Image (cartoon, helix red, strand yellow):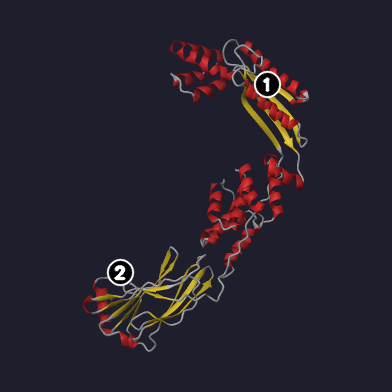
Amino acid sequence: MNRTKYYTILFVILLQFTPLYNIGQNTYLRNLTIREINDSLQVSYRINPNPDSIINSQAIYISPVLMMRDNHYPLEPVIIAGKNKQQILRRWANNYKRELPSYIINPELQNDSAIYFNVQIPYLQKVDSARILVKLESLHYRGKHTLTSDITVSPVIQASQKTYIISPQVSFITPKKENKHHCVQKSNSVFFKIGHSDILPTYRNNDTGISEMERILRDLVNNKNISLEAVYIHGYASPEGRYGVNETLAQKRALALKNHIRSMFNIPDSLLKTDTTPEDWTGLTALIESKELINKEDILNIMSIERDDERETALKQLDSGKPYHIIQKELFPQLRRVEYQICYSIKDYNGDEIKILEKSNPENLSHTELYNLAMSYGETSPEYNRLFTETIPFYFPDDTAAINNAAAVLIKNRDLDAARRLLEQAASSNLLYNNMGIIYMLEGNREEAIRCFDKAISSGNEQAVYNKRELQRKK
């Protein structure tokens, strides 16, 4: 008999006890209960058939299915058959090598015709309604069957026993106190004409580049909470002409920017450090790789020649010098430049200063300062949630502690999907396993939860010890 033709019983976990219900054919469903056993739910019920209502040639098919949300669990099927029908069914099963339900009852032989059932299913959370739907099918002589209409048994009775609520402990990682050292690096900031080392504000985008550098230095120099550590200035020349000439040009270009900074700011000379690249073959290779050029493959092969003079000669000879002419016109001007890097450190702030800066310049705060600020608000505060789930991950996106702590707050807020995405995108670390285990724990995946807790425990995570014990406590 196809299982889809069997009776279906639908209910969910808030149902603990139902009174006697007539589900047709003078057959009764009663004493429906549910209770927790370890990490499972035990469902108990009994069916009371009326022997007087079942004739010799008739059978009633009952095959309950427990439905919870999108999950379903087939329960033990039952056939209540008259004497003749029972013999026919057994003969049919034997002839066609089919399996009958383990319970096939001849009510005429039963003093107590009630059939008792107990089944355990995985524990599921967030189930908040209950109902029973029964489909009846009777088989008569020569296979004739009757399928009655669905019968909904109601009302639902609220369970008097409270469902056990799992209370896991999430893990927070205190970030290590970091050196608040920062560097601002700008490339292609100031450009020079061929053979020149004077800074011309109107040449290319020099006015924009110089203005930006002055703004950065002004903000740093005028900020009493910032200590300027060094300004690194690097002069470059394009790889054409004599090496000695290019070396001098690169030095003069670096010195030109250094003198401009001196004229604008009272910065000690010891903090202004210069360096040079007389012929920027590395920069040229990068430009060639990023640009569509004729003979590009041949050009790149030439760029791999070890000696600079041989490399330059081969470029000039390739395809009668056409590629070299394009390089000289379009790429070399981008190599005649000065780049700079400004390094500074920020002092440690106190509580009130941190609150003010978090609103205006959070980039000046360390991870530790933001973490302590979040903790000071308390977990019921909107600022607590915002700092852990938005601000800190924004400024420290690859930090294991930042990812773990954001996931911890999301788990507390029961946003398990967002927490899972964070943890799965992070680099593998045993520090993350406790919070991942909690996600599995709340989803009812006991096996994966235990696996994660064990990995966390191996790293000394005390919360994982508690959470694993919480899963095992009800055994």
Q: Is residue 282 left or right of residue 216?
A: left
| Residue drawn where x is 33% and y is 72% of the image | 6
Residue type marked 2: Asn
Q: Determine which residue is flagged by label 1.
A: 275
Q: Residue 320 falls in which quadrant of the image?
A: top left
Q: Is residue 260 left or right of residue 77?
A: right
Relative to 282, does residue 357 appear above or below in the rendering? Answer: below
Q: Nearer the viewer, residue 232 or 193?
A: 193
Residue 366 at least partly seen: no
Residue 297 at x, y percent in the picture? 45, 21
Q: Earlier in the sequence, mark 2 or mark 1?
A: 2
Residue 191 at least partly seen: yes
Relative to 30, does residue 11 appear above or below in the rendering? Answer: above
Q: Nearer the viewer, residue 1 or 13?
A: 13
Q: Nearer the viewer, residue 107 or 225?
A: 225
How far apart are labels 2 and 1 at the CA level? 84 Å
Residue 40 at x, y percent in the picture? 50, 69
Relative to 332, does residue 50 appear above or below in the rendering? Answer: below
Q: Is residue 141 left or right of residue 230?
A: left
Q: Is residue 341 left or right of residue 240?
A: right
Residue type marked 1: Asp
Residue 277 at x, y percent in the picture? 63, 19
Dots 2, 1 in contact, CB < 8 A:
no
Count of numbered tags: 2
Q: Determine which residue is flagged by label 2.
A: 2
Q: Residue furthest bottom?
A: 111
Q: Residue 244 falls in which quadrant of the image?
A: top right
Which quarter shows the C terminus?
A: bottom right
Q: Secondary structure at mark 2?
A: loop
Residue 468 at x, y percent in the picture? 59, 62
